[in-house]
Image: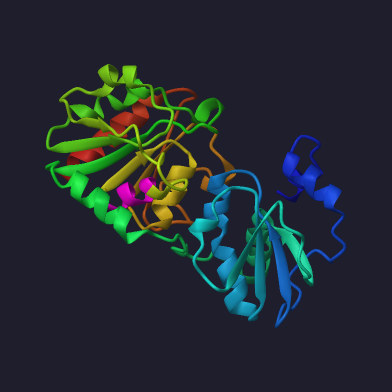
Amino acid sequence: YEWRKKSRTFSDYLNYSKLQIESPIWKNQNLEKKTILVFSEQGIGDLIQFSRYLFYLADKYNCKVVLRLKQNLAHFFDDSRIKIISENDKIPKHDYHNHLASLPGLFYEKNKNFPKTINFIKEKNEITEKWKKILKKYNGLKIGINSHSTATVGERIIPIENFSNLTKIKKMNFFVIQKDFNKNNMKLINQNSNVNYFEDLDKSGKPFEDTIGIIKNLDLLITADTSLGHLSATLGKPTWIALPFVSDWRWFQDKNKSVWYDTVKLFRQKKIGNWTQVFEMIYKDLEKKL
């Protein structure tokens, strides 16, 4: 996976090269009482999934950890062990540096395991309470659904009509959690008038603040392979992720559980492009939850 840094198409590494960082790259050297600079990279899902290593670094080595964020998500972090800087800030003095998605390989090389997830995400209690009151009027199981995000490409995108069978199950309320949802698609999935969509989600505050609040009040999230799955799983919520036949490396190849998250269940295509079979499996498991 280190070969990603040699790509001429990844802007993250092209921008990093321009910085001409002079400190050595961290490769499991002793960090006791030293400072390591970590560059965030790629998507929000990568940030959420691999940020657990920042806390393992801080605890294991009693070191200072500086995370250089490329996204506007500093409000996720509420921990004095991690200092957050933006791409506009001056690079601080430090002893070593590396990229966020390089940390799993280094930790595995030394410890032969994958650390458990850490719920590092800062939650606003007042927003969680707001959504608790909003969702209180909906009876039965409360299930979030997501077919793609604005960054989802290719086979990971799930055509929204695949959720229509699930919404036929009574005694369940479904909540669409995606920013670019086309309301015209409601007629495709709203079988029992039990599908809900809140247009103002995350429009009045910081990114994901409402999303975190609503997820905390759900019983389950069913999603495509998006950052939302990582967010939900990090918050400790039961999360079902529907994967294409050729899935991302982090989900391995043939397991229905994840080494990264205890609360995740994986539903895999057994034939390229066949979401029908995936959602038949999800339907059966949903019926069992009743």
- In the rendering, at what x and y percent does residue 120 appear? 47, 63
- In the rendering, at what x and y percent does residue 149 appear? 48, 33
- In the rendering, at what x and y percent does residue 276 appear? 35, 24
Q: Name above or below for residue 153 compared with residue 78.
A: above
In front: 17, or 88?
A: 88
- In the rendering, at what x and y percent does residue 97 appear? 76, 64
The overriding secondary structure of the stretch rendered in magenta is: helix
Which quadrant holds residue 85? Answer: bottom right
Determine if residue 112 is in view.
no
Q: From the viewer's perspective, is 222 left or right of 71?
A: left
Residue that appears at 18% across and 38% down? 287
Q: From the viewer's perspective, is 247 left or right of 1?
A: left
Residue that appears at 66% across and 49% down? 41
In front: 257, or 238?
A: 238
Residue that appears at 17% across and 38% down? 172
- Quarter of the figure with the C terminus: top left
Determine if residue 164 is in view.
yes
Residue that appears at 72% across and 57% down? 89
Colour mapping used in the image: rainbow
Residue 58 in the magenta stretch? The answer is no
Q: Name above or below for residue 128 compared with residue 61.
A: above
Q: Name above or below for residue 108 compared with residue 62.
A: above
In front: 94, or 166?
A: 94
Q: Which residues are magenta?
A: 210-217
